[in-house]
Amino acid sequence: MNVLDTLLARNEAFATTGFSADLKIVPSLKTMIIGCVDTRVDPADILGVKAGEAVVIRNVGGRIEPATLHNIAILSAVTTASGGKMGQGWNLIVLHHTDCGIKPCLGHAPELLATYFDVPVADLDKLAINDPYASVAVDVAALKANPNLSGDFMVSGLVYDVKTGRVETVVPPALLRPTESTGC
Ligand SMILES: [Zn+2]
């Protein structure tokens, strides 16, 4: 059996036993996770995220780059069109991990990463590509600095260790843009 046949057989089993037609397009946990494409770090596996619970955007490194922001903007519009509102009560989780393939790419093809992040090669150092514990903080800061995102998102940064299977909260949850006190 070739790979496609194997996957189609698994789909048949899913459609027969694991499928629910009642799931909604707006995630039940009001959560968006931005993580890496690495096969070892699927939030469905490491965080137990089930179908219908969370939006997951996966790219190389789980990074906040221009396309990520475009995706979030479109997802926000989709949520609005579906009768919801992204922001208050929603979690925005950045999930980076150890042994990420983006690290060797930095030495091998930095120009590719510069294009990916839409920055000059000389500015790649600012993105902490070599260190997931630093890069997750860089990306949470990038989200907090983005005026186009709802300030009501609860934002956090996690790092998954591929050697232990454990996730560490590196940037504790906080409002994307805490509202300034107006009282006295
Ligand atoms: Zn990775």
Image (spheres, rainbow, N blue to C red):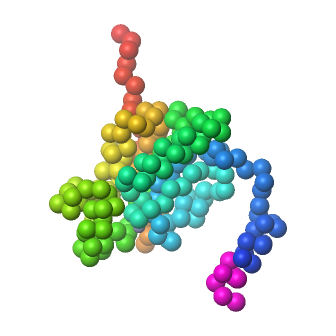
In this rendering, is residue 127 above or below 89? below
Find the residue positioned furthest to the left. 122
Q: Position of residue 175 (x, y in %)?
A: 42, 35
Q: Quadrant of residue 79?
A: top right
The x and y percentages for residue 91 are 51, 43
Region rendered in magenta: 1-7
**Quadrant for ligand 1?**
bottom left
- Report the side of 41 relative to 2 (left or right): left
- Quadrant in the picture for the N terminus: bottom right
- Seen as rendered, the residue at the extreme bottom is 1
- Which residue sits at x=78%, y=66%? 15
Q: Is residue 157 magenta?
A: no
Asked whether the viewer can see residue 165, the reply is: no
Task: State the residue lying farthest toward the top.
Answer: 184
From the viewer's perspective, is residue 168 above or below residue 155? below
Of residues 29 and 166, the one drawn nearer to the viewer in this rendering: 29
Q: Can you see residue 44? A: yes
Q: Report the residue at 58% width, 65% height from top.
A: 45
Q: Where is 98 relative to 24, above or below? A: below
Question: What secondary structure characterizes most of the magenta part?
Answer: helix
**Residue 183, placed above or below residue 107:** above
Q: Percent position (x, y) of residue 27?
A: 63, 46
Query: Residue 9 is drawn in which quadrant?
Result: bottom right
Position in image of residue 52 (x %, y %): 66, 52
The quarter of the picture where the C terminus appears is top left
In the image, is 37 to the left or to the right of 17? Answer: left
At 25% across and 69% down in the image, what residue appears? 110
- What count of labels does the image hold? 0
